Image: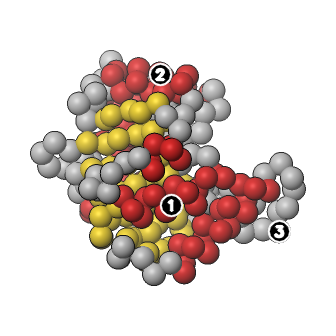
Amino acid sequence: MEKEEILNKIKEEALENHVPIVEDEPLKVIETILKLKRPNRILEVGTAVGYSAINFAKHLCGENSKLKTIELKESMYNKALENITAMGLNDKIEAINADATEYMRNIPDDEQYDVVFIDAAKGQYLVFLEEAIRLTKIGGVIIADNMLYRGRTLSDYNDHKHRTATNRLREYLVVMEEDERLDSTLIKIGDGLAISIVVKK
């Protein structure tokens, strides 16, 4: 099976099983950023089945380039490993089965990334952002998906079920706009894409 066929199968299976993966429109924007950025190192928070990591890895540039991706759920992690292997990307993608809030805190300061992609537990986005700023090179890009949270973030949504996650995403939007370390914008495509350039530490 050709690699494009394998990737399409990964996407189809994820959609059939209601696994959250990056939507087509935001993916195009992210891939455009990656083509311009030509990253040597990418950090992804939230692997799911490895669909986004596989797409991003195509844009790694330079010697010893690497994408590190962190996934909490063991079942997802195992499926991601299977998909990464099927695509022949074991040398480019390092999958970690861990709680990203803890794992990121233990990444040393000198392990710097060109791009950090956040697509995991919405209630932890502020934690991820702070660690991402620490781990992203000056001029590097932090991208956060699902910022609109199905329309909840920018509405008067206040139901108990998603209240905490919604409030944290609202706080994220405020922080990315006001933090002097970042130059940010929110693009209202897909479920909302926040793009922040790290301009200083």
Q: Read off the residue under disc 2.
A: 78
- Mark 1 to mark 2 CA distance (whole Å): 26 Å
Task: Identify the residue at image location x=82%, y=63%.
Answer: 157
Say which of marks 1 and 2 sits in front. Answer: 1
Query: In this rendering, would 69 be left or right of 2?
Result: right
Query: Extreme left residue here?
Result: 63
Element class at badge 3: loop
Disc ID at residue 156: 3
Disc ID at residue 149: none
Sequence-wise, the earlier of marks 3 and 1 is 1
- The x, y position of residue 189, in whole percent, is 56, 61
140 over 1 or under it: above or below: below
Task: Identify the residue at image location x=40%, y=40%.
Answer: 69
For the residues labelled 1 and 2, say whether their Cβ atoms are less than 8 Å apart. Answer: no
Sequence-wise, the earlier of marks 2 and 3 is 2
Q: Read off the residue under disc 1.
A: 129
Task: Using the image as rendered, state which of residue 56 and residue 96 is in the foreground.
Answer: 96
Task: Using the image as rendered, state which of residue 137 and residue 2 is in the foreground.
Answer: 137
Task: Identify the residue at image location x=59%, y=39%.
Answer: 20
